[in-house]
Image (cartoon, rainbow, N blue to C red):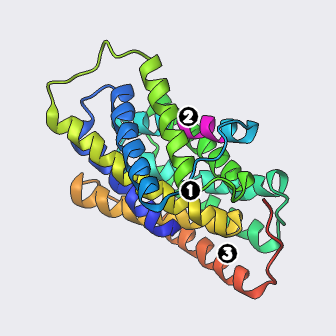
Amino acid sequence: MMSLGAFFLVANDALIKLYASGLPTSQIIGFRALATVLFCLALMAKTGWALPSLLGRDLLIRTGFTIANVFAFVAAVIALPFSLAVFVDMTNILLIALLAPFVLSERLTTLKICTILVGLLGACLLLSVQGLGVGWLIVLPVLSALAGAGRELWTRKLGPEYSAVSLTLYAALGMIIVALTFGTSGWIFDQPSAILAALAAGCLQGIAMILMTNALQTGEVSFVAPFRLTALVWAAGIAWILFGEKFTTMDLIGASCIAIALLMLGLGAHSTPKQPDHA
């Protein structure tokens, strides 16, 4: 679920960069969130799922992290090369693995520490090539990574009371409110293809977030979350095919380090006893 969700998430970002990058960031997020809300409501009407309480500190924290993640990442996708924005954003996996023992009381094993180090090495190799010459704009995906780590940790902390659909719906409603708060005076309405692209991206994002949230609620977060790194594979392929971005030997070595980290984590999960689930 996490790998498939990562694909839909990258596809949504590619759609935005290809067809909607001429719109203001707040308009892109507002229209995309609107499509996500409609998608979630249609799904809930079909399945009969009920909305849990809107109140709760952890829910508000999770929604805040999600909004910050989306705004920072959309700005990064528009301003930076596509692969660079995704590669830097994926470093949130390292933060998740490091913080999960403190936020969720998950066990930090030697294998997980080695996984973090190998993944960090791969990220550093990628950044050493991709991050040159972008200046302060590199802060955008870094902020996105920090907020994304918080979102995924608090997704698991909320527990099964909140379904993946309800969490996605709440976050999308929050994005609409924030987008409208920034103001609509600069919004553009004479580019119907760009607006349709933002709406289509919202549907893809809704599917992605539901899949990824279900994955986080089902498995141990420090095990499940690294499989979001498959987004690097999807991003590299899309960047090469659609945007003509080139990759060096150092990029390939960095990606290989990340693949090794995922393999190490997967082998460790199957070779150790299952830990108690932490809500």
Q: Where is 35 relative to 186, above or below?
A: below
Q: Earlier in the sequence, mark 1 or mark 2?
A: 2
Comes first in the chain, label 3 or label 2: 2
Magenta region, mostly helix, strand or loop?
helix
Which residue in the rendered view is the most extreme toward the bottom?
A: 271
Q: Earlier in the sequence, mark 3 or mark 1?
A: 1
Q: Which residue is mark 2?
A: 68
Badge 3 marks a residue whose secondary structure is: helix
Which residue lies under the disc numbered 3? 265
- Magenta stretch: includes residue 61: no
The amino acid on which the numbered mark 3 sits, given as a three-letter code, is Leu
Residue 17 in the figure: left or right of residue 70: left
Residue 246, how many percent across, how many down? 30, 57
Q: Secondary structure at mark 1?
A: helix
Towards the viewer: 253 or 225: 225
User: Magenta residues, as a range?
Assistant: 62-68
Q: Quadrant of residue 60?
A: top right
Identified by mark 1, the residue type is Ala
- State the image quarter where residue 106 is shown: bottom right
| Identity of the residue drawn at 48% across and 32% down | 175
